[in-house]
Image (tube, helix red, strand yellow):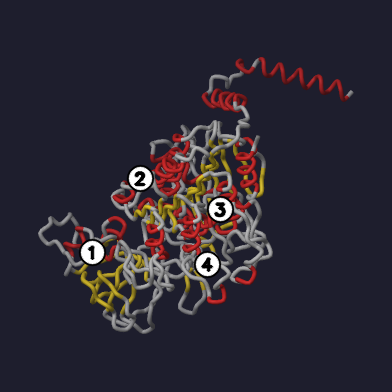
Amino acid sequence: MQTRRTFLIAGLAAPMLARPGRAADETLRLRELYERRGTGLSDLAANLVGERISVDGFMAPPLKAESRFFVLTKMPMAVCPFCESEAEWPNDILAVYTKRIVDVSPFNVKITTTGVLETGAYRDPDTGFLSMVRLTDASYV
Amino acid sequence: MKTTLSVSALALFAATGAIAQDLPQAESQWFTDGQSAVQAMIDRQPNTNTAKNIIVLVADGNGVGTNYITRLFDGQQKGMLGEENVLPYETPDWSSALIKTYNINAQTPDSAPTAGAMNTGVKQRFNLINLGGDAIHDDCSTVEGNELTTFGEIVTGMDKSVGFVSTARVTHATPAAVYSKTANRNWEDSVPEECDGIQTDIATQLIDQMEAGMIDFAMGGGRRHFVPEGVETDEGGSGRRADGVNLIDRATGLGAQYAWNTETFDALTTDAPVLALFNDSHMEYEADRADDDEPSLADMTKKAIEFLSQNENGYYLEIEAGRVDHANHAGNAARVVRDGVAYAEAVAMADEMTDDEDTLIIVTADHEHALALNGYCGRGSDIMGLCYDIAQHGDKHSDELVLGSDGKPFTVVGYLNGAGSVLVEQEDGTFAAPEGRPEITQEDATDLDYVQQALVPKSSESHSGEDVAVYAKGPWAHLFDSTLEQNVIFHVMHHAVTAE
């Protein structure tokens, strides 16, 4: 499911790097978790692995009903027939595993998701969705 | 009596002209700039040379409204209020006209038949590329007998070279119109079984045309359509070709050079045809692009001209800024304008590298989008931000936001439909805005990922049928005047290369 360059450094958390200044309760933009062009985790994200963080974004239309899993996108997950001949995930997305069954939010309403940041390859057993970066034990408003 | 009136009018006109410098506004910069603009147009002489080279630069989805927001963004980035900015193709030495973009069967066009119209001289049907008006979308049985001759094929017959550059996939509609003929624009790496023996997929057609010597330079995205299913691409993705053919291997086997990132782009030489595929799908938006990963549109334009200009008989080059369109579809004006500026830089590069005496440069778009502009905003309102009120004194806007009747501010740029709709799907499936329009702050509105508010709810914002502009300089550029059908662009190109 990964598209580009497969987040080669996604698993390479760099705890020794200095953490950029950030308030503990600050809500991050999804793009801040990635290097430019979605090629890998940002230093900020690498330093937040294992921590509970909040990220702004949009809930993509769920892949499965009655699930505890959804994909967070930085912009509404528009399906553009003149851009792509089929639906495609952008590079910079975030898999979200929730505490409770997902109450679906419209794809174009901004939500703030809070959960524990995890990295490394994980294939969702129900949908087959392969993620390299995730929020687990998550909730959203 | 009529004769007397005419004579009187002439006398009045002459007298008015004689005293122009005595007018109270004569010292105004607006007045003298206006005089200079008229003089520049008077000085412009029709260029009736035979065009050796033709360059067409298409910004996909860059209608008059979209071009307007790029002009202001570019100006504001340079420290201007923005409205006064002049893009490289907006100076008086460029001729211009309005272009009607509809397709044979569509008031609202798509990029395939519009690019086809520019490349063949006739309007085409929605979703088709370079097939005549009797061909039907998705129906292979209507391909045979309806294939049109392209401008690329015509000038190949004149021993010119042909190439293209796009930030979209090289198999996407606008670049594909240079070299392919297809009953469906989406057949990028395969065709339905019933089409076997009738037409091949678009990627195969590209390599066929490279083998035939028609295409010498192909550069853009879309690598996955050239690589077999299950085979890893250069950057770790996966190929899409169900037929198992590796078209990159085929191209290099034919002697072509292949590039897939900035490093291999820099290593390209001018002694063999070029196939460059910088991304599995489209190239990155300019806002997300990194120089060490993908070249800019201006860099690609430079490389294409350096390569093609080796042919002493000349060349035809189509350059597309493909992602202006995609950002509009997303309702994300911030990426529209950044790709728009990259396009303007490519135009400047093409102009700088060529001679008006022998090269006709055409700058245009294929269609507009459902983009709309709010008012009444003061001068210098951030074109990506909120509409600020008009100041009573000075020229810059006041610090007061203009509010809607709902008491909320709004952005200068909006869309008539799209993902940013203020009507949101409710739990019962209806669409409503129980709390009215969302509040917007200037910080939100000027964020790179901001999606402008829209009216009609749609997953993807749509094209519109509104006119686009065409600008041109070089041989026969002056033929671009008034309001023209899109297919006329081909006829100006054809006249320019064949003029005695």
x, y percent for residue B327: 45, 56
Kindly identify which numbered label has been placed on residue B368. 3
Q: How far apart are marks 2 and 3 (CA)?
A: 37 Å
Kind of residue at disc 2: Thr
Q: Is residue A51 above or below residue B429?
A: above
Amino acid type, mark 4: Thr
**Residue occupying the point 57% across, 76% down:** B194
Asked whether the residues under marks 2 and 4 belong to the same chain, the reply is yes
Type of amino acid under label 1: Leu
Element type where label 1 sits in the image: loop
Q: Nearer the viewer, mark 3 or mark 1?
A: 1
Say which residue label 4 marks. B200
Which residue matches tag 2? B269
Can residue B391 be seen in the rendering of this structure?
no
Q: Is residue B207 above or below residue B474?
A: below
Q: Which chain carries label 1?
A: A
> Label 2 vs label 1: CA separation?
30 Å
Q: Say which residue label 1 marks.
A: A8
| Vertical arrangement, residue B39 with respect to residue B141, above or below | above
Q: Label 3 is found on which chain of the structure?
A: B
Q: Do the residues labelled 3 and 1 touch (CB within 8 Å)?
A: no
**Secondary structure type for disc 2:** loop
Which of the two discs, 3 and 4, labels the residue nearer the N terminus?
4
